[in-house]
Amino acid sequence: MRPLRIALVGTARYPLCEPFVGGLAAHVVGLARGLTARGHAVTLFAPHGSAAEGVHVEAFCDASGLDFSAAARGDLSMLAEPFMREHHAMLGLVLGLADERWGRFDVVHNHSLHYLPIAHAPAVGAAHLTTLHAPPTPWQESAFACLPERQRPAAVTVSATNRATWRRSLPACGVVPNGVDLGRWRFSAEGTSGLAVWAGRIVPEKGPHLAIDAARAAGMRLRLVGPVHAHAYYDAEVAPRLGPDVEVLGHASHAELTGHYGAASVALSTARWEEPYGLTLVEALACGTPVAAFRRGAAPELLTPSTGRLAAPDDVADLARAATEAAALDRRACRDWVEAHASERAMVDRYLALYRQLVGARPDAAPAGDALPGPVCLEVAPAARA
């Protein structure tokens, strides 16, 4: 089969480059690299400063020099400037895709959290797929609802848990779990006894202060790895808990994070919301590190009795119990689970199958005289855990 010309649309909120701001950025760059390695022509649309090895990157329309008129700035209905900058970037993108400014694509695969790529999908001369990385927003639901059903772009999400949040507005939404590059996340056969690791953005909804409390209750040392994005929260909840048993290591590169995962005997996940996936859990497992997590979001889909333990949400004592039990699990079983259920190769295979299905279902691919196909029905990937 011939190589596909694929446009990947990232978020306009931050550059997609290492050290990654979050799981969405890491996922899109990994997918771009994986598709390129298969011989497909990939263009990644992302903010200035984005980079993916071997991948052609096109920067979004830059709104930094956009100078709104005094009349526009005085409009009481005008939204905050960060929103307007994102809107400007996405509007420039969808208009450019519609007039083929960057050439013709077979597939546009949207990963942004913005409504415009969804709303403008029928105007772009390519098959369209949106991956829904988060629960619904009014903007996205409105974009899908305003399109006639036969023009509505195909959509998948990253877990059965997140699909349930979309069921009301997108009952046919499929699931393609995120995957990690097993060549980049190195397996470590032995972690350091009594050492726990927590990774992510230091913000209230990630709950790192609870990881400190749980690790301390379990008698473990803790490494906190990630950027501080909520300074008031850090000052109020994290800083007062610091001591000789807690290291705050800041934003880490991929290689550094791999080392931190591999050195620990257990990874802690303390999400305080229904997290749609939880890429850090899979990254830790790929390094052989079992996980102790609150029973929230997709964590029950990602952890099995062989790879981790679940704790009652926000229950520090129960998480300490889970951490102690998880640290005793077989590290090879953790890696084996990722190889079987959450590899980047499997994820790329699933997306390529969907791309081919969508391209083949387009009206211009139908034989002359055939009726136009209806909406594409996307198969739901099997859940990672029965």
Image: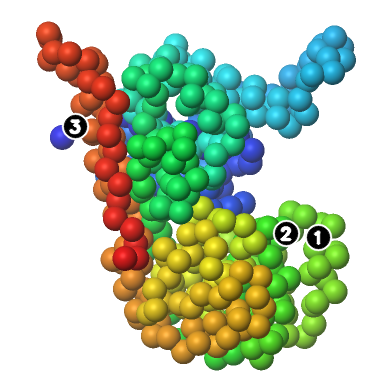
**x%, y% of residue 184?**
42, 63
Residue closest to the eye, 30 or 219: 219
Residue 46 seen in the current view:
no
- Residue located at (85% from left, 74% from top): 240
Position of residue 320 in the picture relative to residue 45 (left or right): right
Nearer the observer, 295 or 125: 295
C-alpha separation, residue under disc 1 versus residue under disc 2? 6 Å
Q: Earlier in the sequence, mark 1 or mark 2?
A: 2
Residue 216 picture quarter: bottom right
Q: Of discs 2 and 3, which sits in the foreground?
A: 2
> Disc 1 designates what residue?
233
Mark sitting on residue 246: none
Residue 131 image offset from top left, x and y in percent:
43, 40
According to the image, label 2 marks what residue?
A: 204
Residue depicted at x 78% and y 29%: 80
Above or below 146: residue 301 = below
